[in-house]
Amino acid sequence: MNIDAKYHPTPEQLEGFAQGSLAPGMNVVISAHVELCSTCRKSISELEEAASEEWLRSAPATRASSINFSAMIDRIVDHPQMKGDDITRNNVPKIHMLDHSVTLPRALAKVASDGLVWNQLAGGINQAMVTLDDQTQCEFLYMKPGSQVPVHKHQGNEVTLVLDGSFEDELGHYKPADFVVRTAKDLHQPASEEGCLCFAVLDSPLTFTKGLARLLNPFIRYRFRRATSAAAY
Amino acid sequence: MDDVISGAGSILMGSLAKTNSVREPASAPRVSSEASDSDERLLIAVGNHQDRAAFNALFSRFSNKIYAMGMKLTRNEQLSHDLVQEAMLTVWQKAPLYDLDRGTAQSWIFTLTRNRCFDILRKMKRQPATVSADDIWPQEGDIDSQLVHEETGTMEVEVSKIESFYGQLPAAQRAVVEQIYIHDRTHEEAAAVLAIPLGTLKSRLRLGVGKLRQMVGTEV
Ligand SMILES: [Zn+2]
């Protein structure tokens, strides 16, 4: 699958993905974009080369003297090797929305395969939260045609990957595979004329800044705590 | 995958037998002959011949580095020890799938280690087991899978045209097609002859056969 995305992860996010230093939720959303974007796939393999150089250069040659490495090798080479035909590819779950279904990138298909519970929020937004780690809030969002999210800002970073349809805000119009990054400084009001399915990852709660929507703030914080504490049991 | 390859076989079989004078050196970009003990060469020996000595050499080059990555991320000797075991086991098991055309051996081993480390950390932090490293980072063969397309119907094309198409393939792909369809070798034998990993052989074969079918398809 290759789609020409206009918006991509930041260089830092791609680097963290290649190095394996990000939280699982952030890894999942970047993985889904990378699967759709050949430009970022190419960057990732270059970043992996660079990370491997750095790893070999900087890692100290320490080893635990207590480990019997030759016994370990003996155990390893007892295992059969894999052939190319051994690779089983994951089947590709779809999400069914109203009148059509959407095929998900592999990582998101895995996330959705446990089943999603959709909640209706104000403004024509449907949300299905998933718990992937204790540092991020992850959710599928379905914006009905003509829906609008209340003006809000974030305390941390918000990443939104468009999977189907499109949405727009003050800064642009976003289509499938677009990876939209908003930082704590950004105040924005997404809306979707044609309807939109996306996957969003937030590394801290939203705060609404206008009108009655502000009443939601304690609720949002509660929801975030609940989403992250579910991971910590 | 096999159906694609054998499908093309019926086109190619026999028609190319005359052209085996074309004997380009198998292009294996990152393995230079002077670096006879490069990581790539060791990995190919492990993947193609289960070469125990080559595996020992890889083990002594990488196990300390893997251990260090484990200590940095888990600060736990037992987990770091487990990481060495699991990462090197994956190197052994997946060596036949390593694809030269997609990166260096050290980068490949780095990504295997990173992935095993991700899974170990996830268990350590008791995070939900929803996604594993293999769901997140692309696996061997994932990219190739998109190149496979089904075609039905018989194609009639002049033998001389196939030969000219074959001549247009990049040398590395031509060498692989030659081994399989002209010399009639198995994948394993061809990988050994060309001294490339089985994974590289398969991906070059898929690419080469795909291109031939495309050229044949646009001519008829
Ligand atoms: Zn991209």
Image (tube, coloured by chain):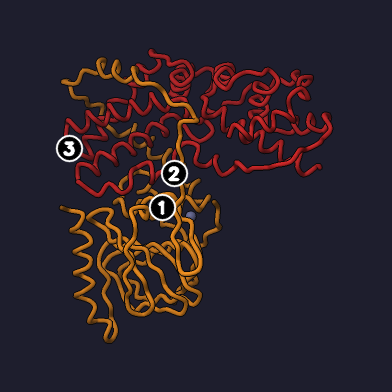
Chain colours: A orange, B red
Residue lying at the far top of the rendered structure: B53
* Residue A125 vertical position relative to residue A74 in the rendered view, above or below: below
Residues at marks 3 and 2, common chain? no
Type of amino acid under label 1: Ala
| Residue A232 horizontal side relative to residue B212, left or right | left
Going 64% across and 42% down the picture, which residue do you hit?
Answer: B150
Instruction: Please name the residue that numbered disc 1 is placed on.
Output: A109
Helix or strand or loop: what does disc 3 sit on? loop
Closer to the chain start, of discs 2 and 1, is 2
Label 2 CB sits under 8 Å from any ligand 1 atom: no
Q: Position of residue B163 (x, y in %)?
A: 79, 29
Q: Chain of mark 2?
A: A
What mark, if any, has residue B52 been given in the picture? Answer: none
Type of amino acid under label 3: Arg
Label 3 or label 2, whichever lies nearer to me, is 2
Going 76% across and 18% down the picture, which residue do you hit?
Answer: B21
Instruction: Please name the residue that numbered disc 2 is placed on.
Output: A90
Q: Position of residue B202 (x, y in %)?
A: 56, 30
Helix or strand or loop: what does disc 2 sit on? loop
- Give the Cα distance between marks 1 and 3: 33 Å
Q: Residues within 10 Å of mark 1 (few under 14, many from 20)?
A: many
Q: Position of residue A223 (x, y in %)?
A: 22, 68
Quadrant location of the C terminus of chain B in the rendered image: top right
- Give the Cα distance between marks 2 and 1: 9 Å
Label 1 or label 3, whichever lies nearer to me, is 1
Q: Residues within 10 Å of mark 3 (few under 14, many from 20)?
A: few
Type of amino acid under label 2: Asn
Q: Chain of mark 1?
A: A
Instruction: Please name the residue that numbered disc 3 is placed on.
Output: B75
- Give the Cα distance between marks 3 and 2: 33 Å
Quadrant location of the N terminus of chain B in the rendered image: top right
Within the image, what quadrant is residue B122 found in?
top left
